[in-house]
Amino acid sequence: MQSSAIFPLFYLPPVNYFTKLKLHDYSFLIEKEEHFVKQTYRNRASIASPNGKLDLFIPVVKGAKVHTLIKDVRISDDLKWQRLHWLSMQTCYRSSAYFEYYEDELKDFYHKKYDFLFDFNLELLNWLLKQIKVDAKIDFTIDYQKNVDSKQDYRTILSSKNSINPQQKNYFQVFDDRNGFMPNLSIIDLLFNQGPQTKLYL
């Protein structure tokens, strides 16, 4: 039976996004009818860098920030963001244990043109779930429901502005000798450092 848990669609979501998905056995609804929300993980991901947390932003077309449905938000090509994001991942994770294991498939996302943020994020999410080796059951909202059981509604809980500091078990991270453990980075941080053990960690 399809879960009624509603999740926003994020760019390379943080680790606690996936721990919440697991609570619902990876059976969930993706919110497709919400308005685009600024300063959230919808177009931002956080990775580990030599200088601490590094945020990667996907630029969106101006005017798409106000009362535009998330499914209609267009990616701006004014900046060479794909090249920048991929170079950042290579620089930050080249020395990690499993970067090379995922590199060939992941880099394709940064060499293909995408018009819509939703489409890009969804393709990435499906790829990530495949790497974690889970059989996810995903459906989409058909209209926006404002009043949803708080235990099923993750649209505002999993927000970079409403940052939850999850009780997260440490795992080895690149640069942890200088930064210490940084919780709740993008799932790719966990993948690059733990590889096939990611599912077990979650």
Image: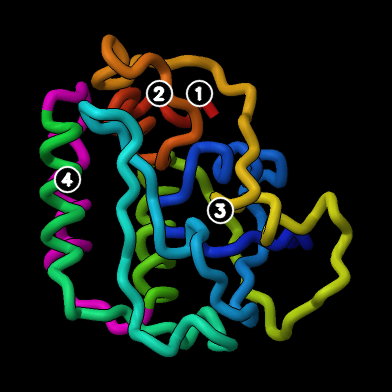
The amino acid at mark 4 is: Ser
Neighbour tally class for label 1: few under 14, some 14-19, many 20 plus, Cα within 10 Å: few
Task: Tell me which segment is drawn in magenta.
Answer: 95-116
94, 67: nearer the viewer: 67
Distance, label 3 to label 4, CA atoms, is: 29 Å
Are dots 1 and 3 in contact, CB under 8 Å?
Answer: no
Are dots 2 and 3 in contact, CB under 8 Å?
Answer: no
Q: Earlier in the sequence, mark 1 or mark 3?
A: 3
Are dots 1 and 2 in contact, CB under 8 Å?
Answer: yes
Disc 4, SS: helix
Distance, label 1 to label 3, CA atoms, is: 17 Å
Distance, label 2 to label 3, CA atoms, is: 18 Å
Q: Mark 2 points at which residue?
A: 197
Distance, label 1 to label 2, CA atoms, is: 6 Å
The amino acid at mark 2 is: Gln
Q: Name the residue under label 4.
A: 88
Q: Which mark is residue 201?
A: 1
The amino acid at mark 1 is: Tyr
